[in-house]
Image (cartoon, coloured by chain):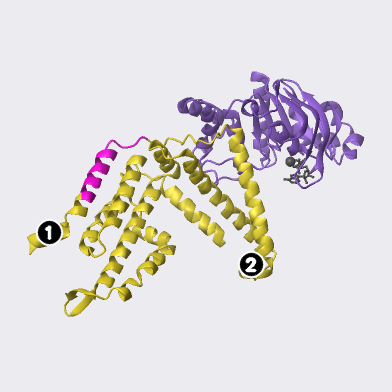
Chain colours: A purple, B yellow
Amino acid sequence: MIRFENVSYTYPGADEVLHDISFSIERGEKVGLIGANGAGKTTILKAALGLIQTTGTITVGGLPMSRENLSEIRKKLGYVLQNSDNQMFMPTVIEDMIFGSVNYGMSRDDAEKKADEVLKDLNIEYLKKRQNHRMSGGEKRLAAIATVLTMEPEALLMDEPSSALDPKNRRNLINLLKRLWDKSRITYVITTHDLDLVLDTCERVIILNNGRIAADGPAEVILRDQALLEANDLELPFCFAGR
Amino acid sequence: MNKAEKAEREILAIDGMSKGDSAVHRMSPLSKLLLTIVYIVITVSFNKYDITGIFIMILFPVVGYVASGVPVSTAFWKLRIVLPLVCAVGIINPFLDREILFYLGNIGVSGGVVSFITLLMKGVFSLLASFLLVSTTPVEEICRALRQVHFPKILTSLFLLTFRYVHVLLEEVSIMTDAYHLRSPGQKGIHISAWGSFLGQLILRSSDRAGQLYDSMLLRGFQGEFYYAKGRKSAAYSWPVAIICIALAVTFRFLNIAAIFGGVII
Ligand SMILES: Nc1ncnc2c1ncn2[C@@H]1O[C@H](COP(=O)(O)OP(=O)(O)OP(=O)(O)O)[C@@H](O)[C@H]1O
Ligand SMILES: [Mg+2]
C-alpha cells in the first residue's frame, strides 16, 4: 500500500531530517509509527502524501509519487493532522466534511448522507452544525477525523490522533479503528506517544530515531523490549510498566 | 480579551449574523448581490446637488434593515472606521464651492455644503447597503452568486481564502499577544523593542498555518474551485422583490419623487 525506498528529506535551510528511509506497508496492515519528539514522524506522513518533495522513491497503492498521480494518491490516503486547527477550513463541521467528497465528484446529497453516517459512527452528531472555531480541542480532533473518514480513504494516516482526547473519546477512537478494520480491513498508520494506544490498535510498530528507522516488528515484541525503547528515548507502555 | 480577539469576534459576529433567518436572509444571494450593486450604482450616480433625490434612496436600507432585523446601530458601529473617511473626502467641498444655491430662512446654503451632504449620504447609504448584504448573506453564498454570473473563479477563491486567512492571522495575533502579556505583567501594549520579532514571528506563523490549511485543502481534492456550500433554498419572492426594488430605484433616479410629492402636498 505504502512503500518508501531510500527516502531522504531536508527542510529548506535546515539539516537533513529523514535519512535513507525504506519500509513497506501492505494493504490491511495496522502500523504504529513511534519515536521521540522531532524524530521525523510527521515528516514521513507528509512525504507519503506528496506534501514535501523527497529524494528516493515513494509508491502509494502501486502508483509512484508524481505530479500526475498526486490527486489519485491523495484520494487513497486520509490524513489527520497533528494540529486540527489547520485541518478544518470551512465555517461549519458539516461543510468541511462535504468539501472533500464533492471535490472528488460525489453529489452533495450523497456526501451529506455519508457525513451523517460518519458522525453517527463517531458519536458526534451534536457537532454537525457547529462552527469550527467554536469547539474544544478534542471536539476539533473528532471533527477532523470525521472529515477524513467521509472521504472513504483506503488508508488512514493519523498524526497523534489521541493527543487531545479525553479517556472516553480515546476509547471511542480505539473502538472505531477496530470497527473500521473489521469492516473493510482498512490500512492505517498512527503516529503517537501513546504507546498503550499503539498496543491496543496496531500489530506492527516502527520506531524512528533522528530520522532513521531504529526498529520494525510486531507490536507485542517491540513494546515489551524495555532496552530497545529506552535506547530510543521511549518508555514501556503503562500496562507493561507495572505501575 | 485582547484587540485581535475582538477584531476576530467582530468578523465572526457578522458571519454569525449572516446565517440568521429573516425575509431578507431568505432571498436568493444572487438577487441580493445584484440589487445591492444596482442600488449603489444608482445612488452614486445622482447629481451632486440633488439632495432630495438622494434622500429618498434611504428608503431601501431602512426597509432592508427593518425586514432583516439587523440593528442599524450595529451597522454604524461596525462602519465606525470607514465613516470618518467618507466625511474626510468631502470636507473640503464647502470651501471650494461657495456659490449660494438657495436660502434657508436667511442663511445662504452654498453648493459646496450641499455637495458635501450629498456625498456623505451617498457614502453612508452605499456602506449601509453593503453591510446589509454581508450581514444577511454568508460569504460562501456571495462567492457562489459571483460564480453564477461568471465572475472569474480565481477571484472568488481568492476572496474566500482571504476571508479564511484573515481569521488565521487574527488568531495568531491573539495567541501571541496573550503569550506576551502572560510574561510581561502590568505592561500596556507591546514594547517597541519586541515589535520586530513579534511581527516576524507573526508573519512566519500565519504563513505556516495558511500553508498547512492550504495543504489540507489540496488533500481533499481542491483544484482551484470551491464548490460553494449550498445554503437553504431561496424564497420564491427573491427575484420579484429584487426586480421591483431595482425598478423603483431607477424611477427614483429619473423622477424626482420628493419634488413631485412636495408639489402635490403644497
Ligand atoms: N518546517 C520545518 N522547517 C525546518 N525544520 C523542521 C520543520 N518541521 C519540522 N522540522 C524538523 O524536522 C524534524 C522532524 O520533525 P517532525 O515534525 O517530523 O517530528 P515528529 O516526529 O513528528 O515530532 P513530534 O512528536 O514532536 O510531533 C525535527 O527535528 C524538526 O525540528
Ligand atoms: Mg509530529
- Counting labels gives 2
The chief SS type of the magenta part is helix
Q: Which residue is mark 2?
A: B190
Quarter occupied by residue A4: top right
| Ligand 2 in which quarter | top right
Quarter occupied by residue B180: bottom right
Name which residue lies at 35% across and 71% down. B91
Task: Mark 1 or mark 2: name the one nearer the start of the chain.
Answer: 2
| Distance between the alpha carbons at the discs numbered 1 and 2 | 59 Å
- For badge 1, the amino acid type reads Phe
- Circle on res. B261: 1
- For badge 2, the amino acid type reads Ile
Hey, which residue is sitting farthest bottom in the picture? B106
Front residue of A116/A27: it is A27
Label 2 CA crowd tier, 10 Å (few <14, some 14–19, many 20+): few
Q: Which residues are magenta?
A: B233-250
Residue B15 visible in the picture: yes
Name which residue lies at 24% across and 65% down. B49
Q: Position of residue B136 (x, y in %)?
A: 37, 47
Chain containing the residue with disc 2:
B
Name which residue lies at 55% across and 41% down. A89
Label 1 CA crowd tier, 10 Å (few <14, some 14–19, many 20+): few
Q: Position of residue B159 (x, y in %)?
A: 49, 46
- Circle on res. B157: none
| Residue A169 drawn in magenta | no
Left or right of B57 on screen, residue A227? right
Instruction: Check the image and report above or below for A162 versus B168.
Output: above
Q: Nearer the viewer, mark 1 or mark 2?
A: 1
Front residue of B245/A230: it is B245
